[in-house]
Image (cartoon, rainbow, N blue to C red):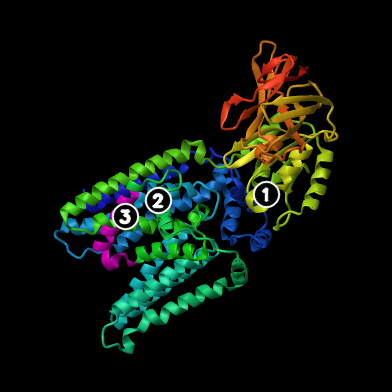
Amino acid sequence: MEIGARWRWLLVVILLLAFGLRVHNLEVQSFWNDEGNSARLSERSIPLIIEGTASDIHPPLYYLLLNQWRKLVGDSEFSLRSLSLFAGLLTVPLTFVLGKKLEHRVTQRSRRVSQRGSWFLGLIAAALLAINPGMVYYSQEARMYALLGLWAVLSTVLLLRWLSAVSGQLSVNSKQYSAISKSSFVWGGAYVLCAVAGLYTHYFFPGVLLVHNLFVLFKIIQSLPKPLTINNLQLTIKQWPFLMLATFLLYVPWLPIFLDQFGSDSINRPGIWEFVTAVSHFLTFGATIELETSLLWLVAGLLGLGLVYGRSKLILPVLSVIIPLGMMFATGTTGAEYFKFLVVAVPFWLIWLGAAFSETNQRGLQLLAGVCLLVLPWGMVQSLQNMYSDPAYARADYRAMANRILAEAHPNAGVILDAANQWEAFTYYYPDEGNVYPLPQGRSHPNPDEIDATLSDIAAQHDRLYAIFWGEAQRDPERLIERWLDAHAFKATDEWYGDVRFVTYAVPSAPAVEMETAVSLPFGDNIALNGYTLGETILRPGDIVEVTLFWQTAVPLQTRYKVFLHLLDENGNLVSQRDSEPGGGLALTTTWQPGEVILDNHGLLIPSDLPPGSYQLQLGLYDLANPANRLPIATPDGIIDAYWLTTVIVVE
């Protein structure tokens, strides 16, 4: 078999691997917030998509493509994510083509070396891209980032084809000129269309165009002989501005919206070394593995070796990495949440790494680079395993939250979404029948009076409220919504689904402000339970026990304590429990003022499968740092560590 044929078969294997990794578990995880936005926005008509994206933080092209894509394949998670899957998959062979075009060996010691050289850099880069965790991740997300990476690589390939055609025009006779001139026109037109597609896909794509302009400038300077004559400038200088002008004119309709995206927010940057370390880790291993300094030193060695032997041949990959990183650092978009912009740089980063092996003719350095390149997949595989199976790296599970609410089937439940942009993801799984309330409305921080009025109206309509908290640091930094709910309702569950918090509240007919049972029980040396008020104690499975506690301290407290409510059966077995810091976590014991009475609402969910019978409800306090350290409670009958509040009767 010829060497070229073997490389082709290897490329097929790489593509199959890339496809397998991208299709694996494609539909397993729920849509998260931004994916929900893609799903709901793309279901609109084309005019409404354009109108919606005019006020969004992303341009319309991805949503328009997804709108047509869903008509072909459906609107399941698998179907909607498959557009990104194929965009990410196509980036792999294009990276091979790009690496192949950049591979020009200076020395050709044999025909075998020459043939290998024309394929090898592209194959290395394509293989690394096939298993790159970051690119696999965004190929499995119903967002525009895989498409952004595709446009970045495709436009660069088209740029090189156009430059090749322009160079041909300068070196042929008049009979050949017409055909080559037509070729340069075709490739130039294709480049313009691809560049415009990139601009209409994401607002970070201008970074790719900046790279291309710098590269063209470099090629012009590199090709100019001395002394300079006007004939030497000819086609590249004359044609390139027209390509850029055509790109600009096609983008002019959207340009005012693009410019409107630039705000005046303050910029907070990390140290340059911290930033470079973090992005190097992401570019190589993605975001689903802890940073390994030893692996990054290995990466740095490969980059240095590639740069030494690649020389000017790596100017395009190097620019394609350095410029996007520089733009992110300059604009302050340096947090991990912005690393997805670097899909435009990952293929070029991997080409740069692959050059360490393919560009050197020294056997010893080639062997060293080869060993280092074989180590990288080990880290990538670990990252992929975490991405597929580690809950710590899972997307927020809106599907599970919606299914839980539907399964509990409470007849009068409302759902509050703290951060209004959760509505799209949540309602993809849960029908909004007028009982889903995205709060706060608008882009500014919520007004306390408006929140009080809105939540009072919502609570008056429902006996049960589910609250889903996400992004409140940006949308509700004072946590007004949660504070109101904790003061006026009874929190029964508080659980994490990925990076989203799911909370269940029981809404009383009237909030407990009066203490019904006075006890004056000392908890430890400094805390006293003045008394409590209980809601209904005859309940059904799925109901919530409502408890309001009235606490007081004599001195400032230095220790954070948790309140526990335990429901025990007749044999003393625990059947349900609720552990929480006072005030739902918003009235920490370290904030209590001496003499102040703390109203502390708690709810305890009766399990849906709990048999009918009598159950004992107990109360206690323990040290947050040491749960085994319960505060002693002094009663007339002696010292105990859990106080009996009441008997709860569960009926069918």
Q: Residue at x 59, y 71 (%)?
A: 255
Residue 310 in magenta stretch: yes
Task: Report the side of 581 relative to 517 (left or right).
Answer: left
Q: What whole-number distance in Å separates the C-alpha atoms at marks 3 and 1?
A: 41 Å
Give the amino acid at mark 1.
Answer: Ala
Q: Residue at x 51, y 73 (%)?
A: 247
Mark 3 or 1, nearer chain start: 3
- Quick one: 403 or 538, which is closer to the camera? 538
Task: Report the side of 520 relative to 379 (left or right).
Answer: right
Mark identifier at residue 300: 3
Residue 153 in magenta stretch: no
Give the amino acid at mark 3.
Answer: Ala
Q: What whole-number distance in Å separates the C-alpha atoms at marks 2 and 3?
A: 11 Å
In the image, the segment drawn in magenta is 295-315
The residue labelled by disc 1 is 419
Circle 2 packing at 10 Å, graded few (<14), some (14-19), many (20+), is: many
Image position, residue 615 (x, y; %): 73, 16
Image position, residue 87 (x, y; %): 47, 53
Circles 3 and 1, Cβ within 8 Å, touching? The answer is: no
- Quick one: 569 or 626, which is closer to the camera? 626
* Secondary element type, mark 2: helix
Does the image show residue 94?
no
The residue labelled by disc 2 is 281
